[in-house]
Amino acid sequence: MRILAFESSCDDTAVAVTEGRRVIASKTASQVEEHILYGGVVPEIASRRHIEAISNLYTTVMTEANLTLDDIDAIAVTYAPGLIGSLLVGVGFAKGLAFAANKPLIPVHHLRSHIAANYITGADLKPPFLALVVSGGHSHLVDVSDYTTFKVIGRTRDDAAGECFDKTGRAMGLPYPGGVHLDKIADNGDSSKYLLPKPHVEGNPLDFSFSGLKTAVINLLHNAQQKGEEIICEDVAASVRKTVCDILIDRTFKALDTLPYKTLVIAGGVSANSELRRRMTEECEKRGIDLYIPDLSLCGDNAAMVGVQGYYEYQSGKTANADLNAYATMDIQNPVY
């Protein structure tokens, strides 16, 4: 089954053609260079750039795949969650094509598709498993009992792990996206230089909280500046990275202790973090846990993962009509459309 997929939940416009778990063609147009000017994503600019990019990107992907719309069986699109203006561009374009070509339209939840990125690189991966979904906007522990059956057993109560990386990186004067640059300079730092807090959520041992950590780092930097003390950014970066990874690893294996699974999946933009990948690999080897992490090219937003998850959504009978809307927030467990 060939699926034409669209992704436009934030600042990456992406189009792909997939067949089951196989990627036939996939392209992404990034807006990072423009948003660097503002230190973060400007929603209005992002949505306008999606409008400018999506049609040409669609043409390029179909040409590379050597296919026409007649060769496509269904059209999948990310409809939630994300920046509402950005989502509407992808949803509108996908609905138009589906209507014009009389093809089924498949609504895909953004976090579900991030988990599905592992199906592309992990040919033998199948549910059930535990998924740690970590990105700039989300930090979830998800019990994935089937391809379209999800249960959140842990989540952030405030900031996401990726937001903590990005905001502390920005406070250190690093370019956007801060988390990527923080990871790079942390390799040259002393992770034991600064003792940072590891907040817990009382009564919810599997939940995350990163707001206090972010605030502690910002206060550390401001206090040092006011006192004229030297701050080694590499040491701060290494300390932040280690602390975030400590928290993620602690909650993840506590969650695994509550489930009868021996498989762990990591997904989302933060799954590209070098220390998280290394330490999770080491810990899983010690515990006899099968670990799946996407290729670096699939950690960020892309349409190939949308197409793959769209395949499983279609198999479970989930399609949408021409009144499909976009949503800024949406539960991964029981999404509506």
Image (cartoon, rainbow, N blue to C red):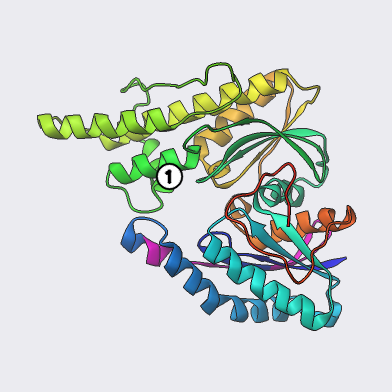
Q: Position of residue 277 (x, y in %)?
A: 57, 36
| Magenta stretch in the rendered image | 16-35
Q: Residue at x 78, y 76 (%)?
A: 98
Q: Judge from the rendering whether residue 72 lies leftward or rightward of residue 214; answer left or right.
A: right
Q: Residue at x 20, y 34 (%)?
A: 222
Residue 327 inside the magenta-drawn segment: no
Q: Position of residue 193 (x, y in %)?
A: 31, 22
Q: Judge from the rendering whether residue 308 lies leftward or rightward of residue 249; answer left or right.
A: right
When the figure is inspected, residue 15 is found, relative to residue 313, above or below; the finding is below
Q: Nearer the viewer, residue 294 or 161?
A: 161
Q: Residue at x 59, y 75 (%)?
A: 54
Q: Judge from the rendering whether residue 233 lies leftward or rightward of residue 75; answer left or right.
A: left
When the figure is inspected, residue 252 is found, relative to residue 69, above or below; the finding is above
Q: Could you tell me which quadrant the C terminus lies in?
A: bottom right
Q: Nearer the viewer, residue 174 or 7?
A: 7
When the figure is inspected, residue 133 is found, relative to residue 321, above or below; the finding is above
Q: Which residue is mark 1?
A: 179
Q: Residue at x 61, y 66 (%)?
A: 14
Q: Nearer the viewer, residue 132 or 211?
A: 211
